[in-house]
Amino acid sequence: MEQKLFDLIYASVLAKEHTYDGIYYTCVRTTRIFCRPSCRARTPYPQNVRFVNSPEEAIKLGFRPCKRCKPEEAGELGPDEMMAARVDHLIEQDLSRPVTLNILAGQLAVSPFHLQKVYKRVKGYSPAEYLQGVRMKEAKKLLAQDEPTVGMISRVVGFRSPSHFTVWFKREAGCSPRDYRALYSKGDRI
């Protein structure tokens, strides 16, 4: 490998960037471990690094996969992105059940602090903000129908009481659920 290319890839390893993820893998001679270039593990010294093009090549050379970044798992998503996707799935699964950071962290076997930090870094917003967005989208979808009552909708989207749901909806949407339903039935959307 040319020194110029090595320096470019090593710079992305130093910055923990995803630029070369899936293209090159960082093999660390001293630990006999290979990682994604974006791995959050301690950065190895350049003299201890060798870059390869595939996990299979690294394994043939006698390196084992990092337990932190799991470079042998297929796909461009690293473990942090996979965790964020799993959080999204857990939130969307059933809005009527209680959803807290502690519950989500318990289901993923990580600490709430770690979950919050990783999710916010990957997505740019917190799991709570995502939950509120999903609840609002579902509430508006249900309010567009004539059938479910506001009380039924409040339970479906995870609120214990219709009054709490109404206060939340008015704060977030700028009008009450009944006003939204009336406006929506006229063809207007908020």
Image (cartoon, rainbow, N blue to C red):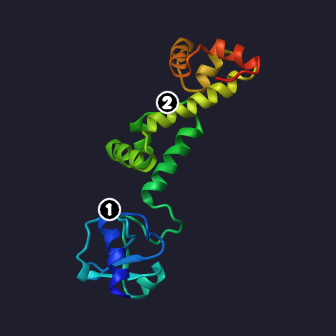
Please report the residue visible at 63 percent of the width from the left and 30 percent of the height from the top: 138
Label at residue 40: 1
Q: Nearer the viewer, mark 1 or mark 2?
A: 1
Asked if 177 appears above or below 58 in the picture, the reply is above
Q: Quadrant of the N terminus?
A: bottom left
Residue occupying image coordinates x 45% and y 61%: 78
x and y percentages locating residue 74 in the rendered image: 53, 69
In the image, taking residue 97 as reference, residue 5 lies left or right, namely left
Is residue 172 rendered to the left or right of residue 142?
left
Q: Which residue is mark 2?
A: 98
In terms of secondary structure, where does tag 2 sit?
Answer: loop
Tell me the crowding category of disc 1: few under 14, some 14 to 19, or many 20 or more residues within 10 angstroms, Cα based: some
Q: Depth check: 13 or 128 in front?
A: 13
Quick one: SS at disc 1? loop
Instruction: Bin the neighbour count of mark 2 within 10 Å (Cα to Cα): few under 14, some 14-19, many 20 and up.
Output: few
Q: CA distance from mark 1 to mark 2?
A: 32 Å
Q: Note whether 58 is above or below 173 in the view shown.
A: below
Return the disc, 1 or 2, that comes first in the chain's sequence: 1
Q: Decide if residue 144 is on the left or right side of residue 73.
A: right
Three-letter residue code for mark 2: Pro
Would you place residue 40 above or below residue 127 in this image? below
Q: How many marks?
A: 2
Asked where in the image residue 48 lies, by quadrant, the reply is bottom left
For image coordinates 57% across by 34% down, the residue present is 134
User: Which quadrant of the structure image shows residue 27?
Assistant: bottom left
Q: Which mark is residue 183?
A: none
Q: Position of residue 25 (x, y in %)?
A: 41, 76
